[in-house]
Image (cartoon, rainbow, N blue to C red):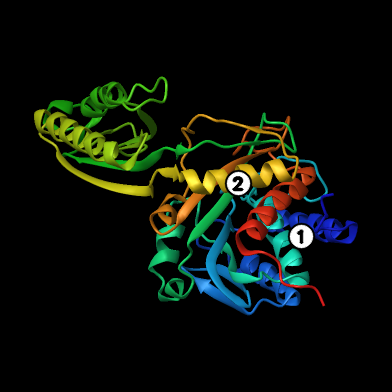
Amino acid sequence: MRRMFLGNSDMVDLVDLRHRLHRRPEISGEERETAATIVAFLEPTGPDRIVTQLGGHGVAAIYEGAEPGPTVMVRCELDALPIEEISTSDHRSEIPGKGHLCGHDGHMAIIAGLARGLARNRPRRGRAVLLFQPAEETGAGAAAVIADPAFAGIAPDYAFSLHNRPGVPVGHARISEGAANCASRGIKIVLTGETSHASTPHHARSPAPAIAELIPALTALGPGGEIDADFRLVTVTHVAIGEPAFGITPGHGELWATLRTLNDAQMGALCEAAEALAREVAGRSRLDVAMSYHDVFHHCENDAEAVALLRKAMDEENVPHGPTAPSRGSEDFGLFGRKAKAAMFLLGSGDTAHLHNPDYDFPDDAIAPGARVLMRALRNLLGEAART
């Protein structure tokens, strides 16, 4: 018979934690208060060590086993989004223009639940590491955590993570081997010409015609469609031309676009194509051009052994699961897969608003099944210390 490691009082505390985090969202790189809230929750669980300020405001709680064994890391995210929440719930955001509209508050509550289980029964062997990662939404957090000298003392052999998925029933999961999340990055194209009086546009070097040409041409480089080995998607996200005035022919313009491919290897070719196109169009319009990249996300690849371990845990915890296609959306978890056998699964959040919608709210009922799967995976790899 399956033994529940979270009791009713635990669930009350975890729901309360999620609601407190939801009320006080902090965006990427600003998660100071969120990290402090997490540390305050973790300390009573008696980890052998808590690492703070990891790659920014990251937090890692380490629970040691008595015998040698693997290090298993379970990771969640600290940050919220710069979006105004329109929810009417009692725990809606108290911070104007910011909201936990991707469910990271729920992910943190799930991993905090693991801390309660580890407090009551340490691993028999190896180490369990609970990582609360900063700056996931910008793609900067995982790289910063890995680059932090303190991460060398963690060095996981396995890394697990989850993300909630609207449309999948609560208490169900989805997971597949191989490509899990696309690579993506933002390209900023800055075009500089020369202004003139609006009555003499022929005296100017305006970026307007170049931007008008670039919008469909860039989009044609990445038409989207089915996610296969040749998948490419280019989405124009922002355009600005000139000054907000009627008497000036513009001399400056910017075009921002998101480039998306199935994996990192394909991203290089798409970047080269976009840069070559921008230089060609700028040259014909006698414009200077500068390009830079932002919000760089590496693709996520689910390791076959790590997937098998999660599927076994789902079966043992009676969590229904099935396969899933690679997600177009990016996830700042892929770099951990270069350091460990890593896998992420999708946890059903039911009939909710879509992620990043202004009225999204992680369902409290999804906390328990997510925690059960991850705790079972930890126990299967690390065992349980003998009870006294």
- Residue 149 point in image, percent of width and height: 40, 75
Question: Can you say whether 307 is above or below 262 in the image?
Answer: below
- Look at label 1 and name its amino acid: Leu
- Residue 357 point in image, percent of width and height: 62, 36
Quadrant of the frame with the C terminus: bottom right
Instruction: Look at discs 1 and 2 and give the one toward the viewer.
Output: 2
- Please tell me which residue lies in front, 378 or 248: 378
Q: How many marks?
A: 2
Judge whether residue 20 can be spotted in this image: yes
- Residue 196 point in image, percent of width and height: 18, 35
Give the residue at x 77% y 49%.
Answer: 368
- Residue 248 point in image, percent of width and height: 26, 35
**Going by the image, does 121 lie left or right of 104?**
right
Q: Label 2, on which residue? A: 310
- Look at label 2 and name its amino acid: Leu
Q: CA distance from mark 1 to mark 2?
A: 26 Å
